[in-house]
Amino acid sequence: MLEVEGLVKHFPVSGKRGAVVHAVDGVSFSVGAGETLGLVGESGCGKSTVARTVIRMYEPTAGSIRLEGVDIARMKDRELRPIRPKIQMIFQDPASSLNDRMTVGEIIAEPLIAQRIVRNARAARDLVGDMLEAVGLSGQHVSRYPHEFSGGQRQRIGIARALILNPRVVIADEAISALDVSVQAQVINLLRDFQEERGITYLFIAHDLAMVRHVSDRVGVMYLGQLVELCESEEIYRNPLHPYTQGLLRAVPIADPAASSRRVEASIDGDLPSPITPPSGCRFRTRCPLAQDICANVVPEMRDVGDGHQVACHMVS
């Protein structure tokens, strides 16, 4: 359904001639129809940039983005218009992603109007009402404004807006991180229900590894603009191979106090290097306890080490 190959996105640095932020550097992955791919990593690793580049909010510097086999990476706005209903996005913060000056009915109807499916919000009223009911809200809420809803309800409105066009692919960019734990579970269940009913493909971006485990079929781990590990969801928790993935999992809190006290391993040391001047070779080497000379001189390639488990590390045989 979605194939990303060699995706690159660099941002020029203001006031520094020739300097760029290496936000995304050569990321490749694919997501099948009805599948959920989780994308995890520290803040600043490039997850959201991948999302916004895939959906063409950002212009890719290089690489291809194939949606149902069609490369949309270099399409102009006019060519993209009929493609956009197929791929939609749920944003992280429901408070800032919804226009407080528009009613809920106008917000959800806006994609229909932009795609010329209906002329105005009044013509879309029945469609909007049905979608509100589908996400667990009342169809009578169309005349209310976003500030009249709770955070969880606002995120449901954001989901309704993303799904009103019946997309094939939905990118959820930290879609639950701003919500309470109980509300997170409700939103996740809602997304799963829609996936089962409509066969939607999800690219689920988060930093909560525990939540990603429950919602994703496969998980990709990003570090400083690059994908370093990719495999089945349970496999990455049972047998993490990259030192960075192992460090992320060690940092996950354990509910059992006794087990937590026995876990003495350190998580990841040091700070994330600057994406303007990333380390040579393996970008994780400056924080990796296993780093050798080869790590500084040779960029590790993503390779399959068995059963579809891919890792980019010189130390993994």
Image (cartoon, grey):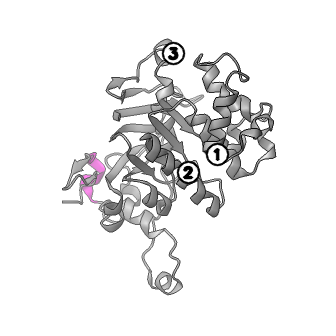
Are the residues tagged 1 and 2 within 8 Å (C-beta)?
A: yes
Residue 227 placed where, x, y %?
36, 46
The amino acid pointed to by label 1 is Arg
Distance from the alpha carbon under mark 1 to that under mark 3: 28 Å
| The residue positioned farthest toward the top in the image shown | 78
Are the residues tagged 1 and 3 within 8 Å (C-beta)?
A: no
Residue at image coords 45%, 32%: 54
Mark 3 closeness class: few <14, some 14–19, many ≥20 residues within 10 Å:
few
Stretch of the chain drawn in magenta? 292-300
Residue at image coords 48%, 42%: 275
- Tell me the number on the disc at residue 77: 3
The amino acid pointed to by label 3 is Asp
Residue 175 placed where, x, y %?
58, 48
Identify the mark nearer the N-term, 1 or 2: 1
Which quadrant is home to the N terminus? top left
| The residue positioned farthest toward the bottom in the image shown | 258
- Tell me the number on the disc at residue 190: 2
The amino acid pointed to by label 2 is Leu
Residue at image coords 39%, 37%: 25
Mark 1 closeness class: few <14, some 14–19, many ≥20 residues within 10 Å:
many
- Magenta stretch contains residue 295: yes
Give SS at disc 3.
helix
